[in-house]
Image: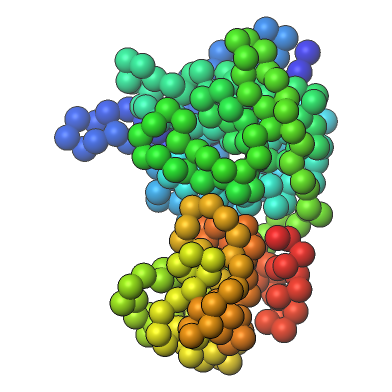
C-alpha cells in the first residue's frame, strides 16, 4: 500500500464560479480526491488556496517547505501538489531545485474549474497520484503531470492558455496508456540546493524583454529600484537592440547580476552576434542561461542570491545548474 500526501495550493482546480466575480479558488484539497485509489491511500491538506497569478516568492518558499516536510514523513511514499497553471512552471522548478529525496513530487492542476461540467481536475489528480506512487519514478525529481503526460519540471512551460494539455517542453518522463503508466525516460538530476531562507521572499529579480524599439533605460531603472539581478529575455539566440550592451555594463558595474535568456519558446542561448547582440552582451557581463527560459532562470537566480552568493562567485554556481 503506497501512501501519498496531496498538498493543495489553489488554482483553477480549486476554483468555483462566483457569478460576476468570476472564478475564485475556494475548494479544499480534500474535496479533490477520494481517500483511496486502489492500493494507494491519499491524505490531503491545504497549504494555500489562491490563484497562482497572485503568488509571490514567499508563497513559493512556503510550498517548498511544506513539500520538504511531507517528504520527510517516513510513512509518505510520494507527494502531489495541486497548483494553478499560470505560474506552475516556476513553483515546480523551485521544487525540483531543492528536491533531495528519491520520493516523487508531482505537480498538477486543471484548465477547467471544479464546478465545470467537464472538469479535468479529478482525472489529472488521479494520474498524478498514480505517478507519485510509482516506484519507477523514484529519483526523477519534481514532475508535472497533466492530461496523461508526465514531464520534468525543468524546461517545462505553459504554452497554451485554454487547451487541455497546456504544458510543453521539459523531458517526457511517462504517459498514460489506458490505465497504465508507461515510463519512458529519467530526467537529468542536479545536486539538490537547500530550501531557500526567508531572504528569498524579498530577493528582487526583474525580467526585461527585448523587442524592436525596446528601452534599455528600463534596465537602469531596475537597478535603481534595488534589483539584485535582471533577466534579459533577448531576441533569438540572445540578442538585444541599441543601448542594451551599455546598460548591461552599467548594471554589472553596480553589482547587479544580468542573466541573458531568450524570449523564444524553445532553444538555447548561443551568443553569436556583435553590434549589440549576444557577443557584446556577454562581454558587458551578462551570463547566458543556456536552455533555461526567463521565468525558470529568474527562480534559479533568486534562489542562489538568497543564500548570499557574492556577485563574483555567482556565474560559476549559476552555470553549474544549467
Q: Nearer the viewer, residue 172 or 230?
A: 172
Q: Where is residue 191? Give x, y as percent.
A: 81, 54
Q: Where is residue 128? Give x, y as percent.
A: 61, 25
Residue in view at x 45 percent, y 51 percent: 55
Q: Nearer the viewer, residue 108 or 59?
A: 108
Residue in view at x 68 percent, y 18 percent: 181
Residue 178 sits in quarter: top right
Q: Is residue 252 visible?
A: no
Q: Is residue 317 visible?
A: yes
Q: Is residue 97 left or right of residue 81?
A: right
Q: Residue furthest top?
A: 38
Scheme by which the image is coloured: rainbow
From the viewer's perspective, is residue 44 above or below residue 222? above
From the viewer's perspective, is residue 82 above or below residue 267? above
Q: Where is residue 7? Give x, y as percent.
A: 59, 33
Image quarter hosting the N terminus: top right
Image quarter hosting the C terminus: bottom right
From the viewer's perspective, is residue 104 above or below residue 225? above
Residue in view at x 76 percent, y 73 percent: 316
Q: How many marks?
A: 0
Q: Nearer the viewer, residue 47 or 194?
A: 194
Q: Where is residue 247? Give x, y as percent.
A: 47, 87
Q: Is residue 215 left or right of residue 201?
A: left
Residue in view at x 51 percent, y 46 percent: 157
Q: Nearer the viewer, residue 202 or 263?
A: 263
Amino acid at each position: 500500500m503506497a501512501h501519498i500526501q496531496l498538498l493543495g495550493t489553489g488554482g483553477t482546480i480549486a476554483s468555483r464560479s462566483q457569478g460576476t466575480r468570476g472564478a475564485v479558488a475556494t475548494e479544499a484539497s480534500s474535496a479533490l480526491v477520494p481517500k483511496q485509489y486502489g492500493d494507494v491511500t491519499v491524505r490531503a491538506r491545504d497549504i494555500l488556496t489562491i490563484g497562482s497569478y497572485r503568488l509571490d516568492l514567499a508563497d513559493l518558499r512556503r510550498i517548498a517547505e511544506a513539500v520538504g516536510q511531507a517528504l520527510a514523513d517516513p510513512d509518505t511514499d510520494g507527494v502531489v501538489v495541486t497548483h494553478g497553471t499560470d505560474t506552475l512552471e516556476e513553483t515546480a522548478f523551485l521544487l525540483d531545485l531543492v528536491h533531495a529525496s528519491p520520493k516523487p513530487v508531482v505537480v498538477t492542476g486543471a484548465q477547467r474549474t471544479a464546478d465545470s461540467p467537464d472538469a479535468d481536475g479529478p482525472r489529472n489528480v488521479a494520474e498524478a497520484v498514480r505517478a507519485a506512487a510509482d516506484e519507477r519514478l523514484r529519483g526523477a525529481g519534481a514532475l508535472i503531470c497533466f492530461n496523461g503526460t508526465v514531464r520534468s519540471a525543468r524546461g517545462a512551460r505553459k504554452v497554451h492558455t485554454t487547451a487541455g494539455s497546456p504544458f510543453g517542453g521539459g523531458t517526457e518522463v511517462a504517459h498514460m496508456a489506458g490505465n497504465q503508466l508507461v515510463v519512458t525516460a529519467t530526467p537529468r538530476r542536479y545536486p539538490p540546493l537547500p530550501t531557500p531562507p526567508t531572504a528569498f521572499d524579498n530577493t528582487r529579480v526583474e525580467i526585461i524583454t527585448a523587442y524592436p524599439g525596446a528601452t534599455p533605460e528600463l534596465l537602469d531603472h531596475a537597478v535603481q529600484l534595488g534589483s539584485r539581478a535582471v533577466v534579459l529575455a533577448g531576441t533569438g539566440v540572445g540578442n538585444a537592440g541599441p543601448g542594451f550592451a551599455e546598460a548591461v555594463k552599467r548594471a554589472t558595474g553596480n553589482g547587479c547580476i544580468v542573466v541573458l535568456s531568450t524570449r523564444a519558446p524553445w532553444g538555447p542561448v548561443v551568443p553569436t552576434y556583435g553590434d549589440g547582440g549576444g557577443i557584446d552582451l556577454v562581454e558587458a557581463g551578462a551570463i547566458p542561461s543556456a536552455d533555461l527560459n526567463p521565468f525558470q532562470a529568474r527562480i534559479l537566480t533568486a534562489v542562489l542570491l538568497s543564500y548570499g552568493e557574492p556577485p563574483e562567485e555567482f556565474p560559476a554556481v549559476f552555470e553549474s545548474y544549467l
